[in-house]
Amino acid sequence: QVQLVESGGGLVQPGESLRLTCTTSGYIFRINAMGWCRQAPGKQRELVAGITSGGSTYYADSAKGRFTISRDNAKNTVYLQMNSLKPEDTAVYYCNLDRVPDSLRRNYWGQGTQVTVSS
C-alpha cells in the first residue's frame, strides 16, 4: 500500500526545535521531489521546504536559515529539522510529493502532524 505518515510534532516554546519525520512507502516517493507543507487555522496550505530526488533543497522565505529538509532514500524517509521556532510556525505540517501535478499529489495527503509554538 502506497502511503506516507508524518510524525514528530508537538508543543514547544519559542526558540526551541523540533524534527519532523515523514515515513513513506512506494517507489513514487523515492523518484520524485518531496515537500513539507503547513496549514495554519484559517490559512491556505503553503510549501515550507522541498527536496528533489537528487537532494537539492528549496525553502520558503519564512523557513530559510531556520529549517532544514533532508531525505534518506534507503529508509524511505524525509525529515524537516526546525530550529528557532516562532509562534507563527504553529500549524499542521504535511509531507507529500512536490513538483508533480495536483491530480497526482492529492492521492497522498496524510493526517499531518501538529506543531504548536507557544510560551
Image (cartoon, rainbow, N blue to C red):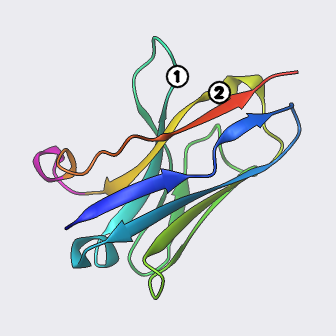
Q: Position of residue 37 (x, y in %)?
A: 46, 42
Dominant secondary structure of the residues highlighted in magenta in the image: helix
What residue appears at the point 42 percent right and 77 percent down from the top-left corner? 76
Res. 114 image quadrant: top right
What residue appears at the point 65 percent right and 44 percent down from the top-left corner? 63
Determine the residue located farthest toward the top in the rendered image.
42
Q: Sort mark 2 into few (<14), some (14-19) or many (20+) by Cα contacts within 10 Å.
A: many
Looking at the rendered structure, the kind of residue marked 1 is: Ala
Q: Is 17 above or below relative to 69?
A: above
Say if the magenta span includes residue 12: no
Q: Nearer the viewer, residue 21 or 36?
A: 21
Range covered by the magenta-colored residues: 100-104
Quadrant occupied by the C terminus: top right
Q: Which residue does the numbered mark 2 point to in the structure image?
A: 90
In contact (CB < 8 Å): disc 2 and disc 1: yes
What residue appears at the point 50 percent right and 15 percent down from the top-left corner? 41
Total count of labels = 2
Q: Which residue does the numbered mark 1 point to in the structure image?
A: 40
Looking at the rendered structure, the kind of residue marked 2 is: Thr
